[in-house]
Image (cartoon, rainbow, N blue to C red):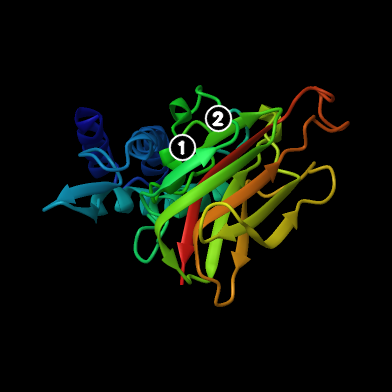
Amino acid sequence: MKVYNSFFDMAEQAAKTNPLSLRNIQLARLSLQYAEMEIAANNMFSKRGWYLISDGKAVPNYNLRKTLDLFEQICHQNQVPNINESKLSTENYILSLRRMIDVDIEGNLAFGKKVSSSSPPDKKYQSGDLSYLTNGVSGASDYNIHWLGWFGNDTELILDLDTLTQAKNISIHSLWNGKSWILHPSEVSCSISADGKTYSPIGTIRVEGEQQKEDPIRNYPFQTENNVYRYVKFTVKGTGKLFNWHPSAGEPSWFFLDEITVKD
């Protein structure tokens, strides 16, 4: 990839006085930039990731962020509509990617904490590792990266914060990709507990309608007021089946979840 980039650098330099040739070179380079960004997304904290580790701390990879800025600029200038064969829009891809690389560690009490599930996520995605729900990295538009999936069933997730807190803001996120049988949950409820035995409900958020057109990522925010708690429970209900508008209507549907946050 370093060699490829060096070729593109030389080509752009040679074409700098020829706008049409320069445009074609920049468009051809988008595929290489896309590959670099997707590799970085798959392993966020590495020498090829969006964050570099320096003195034990995660430091943004500013060179890669410049690549994203340039990628967005070239796509915008040339009105590039979609990213891939699934017709993921360029705008949604960039928005969700920027969301993902904005690592949510600072002030997030859920970061690195243990999560259990009444029904385990499918091992095809992140090996079903529940720690992905609290690793500080928000899933982007690609369900293969940083998302956990449940197929045709519901689940309860319990987050253990280790200590008591009065943090007021709790959230979790879901993904929609109708072509891949992935719908938002029909309902997400949140409850809290100090002892892990008795839970108090703090809210339920429902997704109305048949979800034929939905935003790729949905946030489920919940708020508490002066409650002391250690455990957070999410009760997540899927749609169960695909709706009538779907070519595979009646088949089981997926729902995908990602980052849990708990903040003041």
Left or right? Give the position of 26 relative to 236. Answer: left
Residue 80 picture location, percent across and down = 55, 43
- Number of residues whose C-alpha sits closer than 10 Å to that of mark 1, classed few (under 14), some (14–19) or many (20 or more): some
In this view, the residue in front, 32 or 136, is 136
**Which circle's residue, 2 or 1, is located before the other in the chain?**
2
Res 121 → quadrant: top right
Which residue position holds label 1? 130
Assign the N terminus to one quadrant of the image: top left
Q: Which residue is mark 2?
A: 120
Residue at (34, 64) in percent of width and height? 106
Which residue of the protein is positioned furthest toward the left in this rendering?
Answer: 55
Q: Which is more toward the observer, 49 or 236?
A: 236
* Residue 236 shows in the view: yes
- Tell me the SS state at disc 2: loop
Q: Contact (CB < 8 A) between labels 2 and 1?
A: yes
Type of the residue with mark 2: Pro
